[in-house]
Amino acid sequence: MGRSLLIMCMGAIVIFGMVQQAVQKRQLTFTESNVETFNVSHARNATSSGLEMGINRVLHDNNWDDIERPWLFPIDDMNVRVFVDRNDDFPDEVPPTYLRVRSEYEAANRPLQAFAFLKRGEITPPVEGAVGFYGEGSRLNLSGNAKIYGHDTTPSGDPVVGDASDTVLPGIVSVDTEDELIDQSGTAATYEGDPNFLHNEELDGQEIHDLMEMYKSERDPYVEGNLGTVDNPRITVLEENQKIRDNTNAGGILIITEGTTLELRGDFMFEGLVLVEGTLDIRGNVHIFGAMMFTDNSLLEIDDPEDDDATFTGNTSIYYSSKALMNVNDKLSWRFEQAGTMVDRIFY
């Protein structure tokens, strides 16, 4: 009896030990699972936080493109790395009119990424013609070998290839009639489009004034002769008379305020949007790609070179160019808060 009881007790102890070991093992597994779940959740939250901070910085920091990348956002004792990817660097992954904000974080040797696509908003206005006069009482003095084209053209001078290849705008559109607006001399001066000239009484000069005010809020400090470049366009506001010559890589948004005259001379090329309240005086091999818009009582004068520019011929050309305008929009739209729209976000 005593021996049987001893055996039963020993068996119970063994079974209890086995049960206890199983419970402990289960508790350990459960704890490890909880830790793993916590780490994954922590990494996901950190990655999401980094993504939100990156999106916020892109939308609200006007100098986001000048900041060394990746951005490092400290969370706990580690950094979330945030990248901004553009179509130029990731043509197969990022569409031309988007940015991708990408966040990376690693916790317990477990990397996690999240990214969001931001669609660039439009800051360039609808374009009615290669050259548009939106206010009454403006003048166009057109002479010399000058040409204005409403055919969508790339800065290389070739027609745009793709969806916009068939786009043809009026060469000139004006709230005033052709006779009221244009003083033309010289048989070589032409303006071409569909139609060549369009009289549109519904054009609103106030819209151009409002557009100028929006751009002025994000203007770049003017450095004499610097109108930006194609790769780094600027928003330039001229409030004093200027004479600029021999710049074949200028680009951005150019505003000539009321009472101000800009003289363009020599070999000059500008890609972007030109808005004029005052006077634009062009003489020489000047080529402008994009669009030009004039308010009321403004003046565009295109003439042969002056005597001191005798080495240049009067070969001014103004082209409507969707590509030039798109470049300005893509490079400058992020300065404006309303320019970014969330499209999608993905974790993986």
Image (cartoon, rainbow, N blue to C red):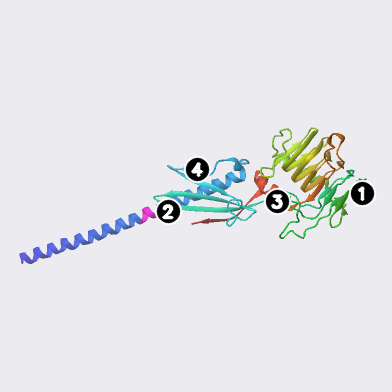
Tell me if mark 3 has few (under 14), some (14-19) or many (20+) residues whose alpha carbon lies within 10 angstroms of its own: some
Q: CA distance from mark 3 to mark 2?
A: 41 Å
Q: Which residue is mark 1?
A: 187
Work out how far the residue at label 4 is from the one at label 3, CA to CA, in angstroms: 32 Å
- Kindly report which numbered mark, 2 or 4, lies closer to the viewer in this rendering: 4
Q: Residue at x 85, y 34 (%)?
A: 308
Q: Which residue is mark 4?
A: 73
SS type, badge 1: loop
> Residue 38 in magenta?
yes
Apparent side of residue 222 relative to residue 298 in the rendered image (left or right): left
Neighbours of disc 1 within 10 Å: few (<14), some (14-19), many (20+):
few
- Residue at mark 2 to residue at mark 4: CA–CA distance: 19 Å
Residue 47, label in figure: none
Looking at the rendered image, the disc whose residue lies closer to the viewer, 4 or 1, is 1
Q: Nearer the viewer, residue 107 or 8?
A: 107
- Mark 3 or 2 closer to N-term? 2
Looking at the image, residue 15 sits to the left or right of residue 92; the answer is: left
Q: Is residue 93 magenta?
A: no
In the rendered structure, the answer to whether residue 3 lies left or right of residue 34 reads left
Q: Position of residue 245 (x, y in %)?
A: 78, 37
What segment is highlighted magenta in the picture?
33-39
Q: Could you say which is closer to the camera, residue 238 or residue 28?
A: 238
Residue under numbered circle 3? 326
Q: Secondary structure at mark 2?
A: helix
Query: Disc 2 designates what residue?
Result: 40
The alpha-carbon separation of the residues under discs 1 and 3 comes to 34 Å
Dot 4: within a 10 Å radius of its alpha carbon, few (fewer than 14), some, or many (20 or more) residues? some
